[in-house]
């Protein structure tokens, strides 16, 4: 998994867990005491939408086809 494979916050978390040394990841990933702030932050991030750059450069699309030797434009 790498950065381009991350589509949501949980994907970023999994990547960080894989790439960072364990003590550093657990320090960043964890919370303190009753973890109320951690839960609120997690809930807030769950409401964020990450919009990938899809259909980039798809402005000149040719949907024509050939049927029985005849070109058909759509």
Image: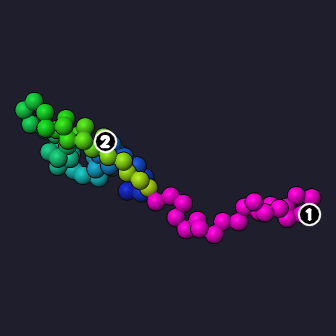
Q: Which residue is mark 1?
A: 69
The residue tagged with tag 1: helix, strand or loop?
loop
> Which residue is most to the front?
74
**Which labelled disc corresponds to residue 10?**
none
Q: Is residue 37 magenta?
A: no
* Residue 7 appearing in the image: yes
Query: What are the residue bounds of the magenta stretch?
Result: 53-74
Q: Residue sitting at 55 percent across and 68 percent down?
A: 57
Q: Residues within 10 Å of mark 2 (few under 14, many from 20)?
A: few
Q: Residue at x 50, y 58 (%)?
A: 54
- Give the distance between the C-alpha atoms of the residues marked 1 and 2, in whole angstroms: 52 Å
For image coordinates 20% across by 47% down, the residue present is: 25
> Where does the image place residue 14, in percent across and percent down from the top left?
32, 45
Q: Is residue 18 visible?
A: no
Q: Is residue 36 above or below residue 60?
A: above
Give the camera-side residue of 68 and 20: 68
Q: Secondary structure at mark 2?
A: loop
Looking at the rendered image, the quarter that the C terminus falls into is bottom right
Image-quadrant location for residue 34: top left
Magenta stretch holds residue 72: yes
Q: Which residue is mark 2?
A: 47
Judged left or right of residue 5, residue 67 is right
**Residue ID at (72%, 61%):** 63
């Amino acid at each position: 998994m790498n950065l381009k494979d991350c589509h949501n916050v949980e994907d970023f978390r999994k990547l960080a867990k894989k790439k960072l040394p364990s003590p550093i990841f657990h320090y960043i990933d964890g919370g303190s005491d009753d973890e109320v702030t951690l839960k609120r932050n997690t809930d807030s991030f769950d409401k964020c939408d990450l919009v990938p750059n899809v259909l980039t450069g798809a402005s000149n699309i040719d949907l024509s086809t050939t049927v029985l030797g005849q070109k058909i434009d759509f």
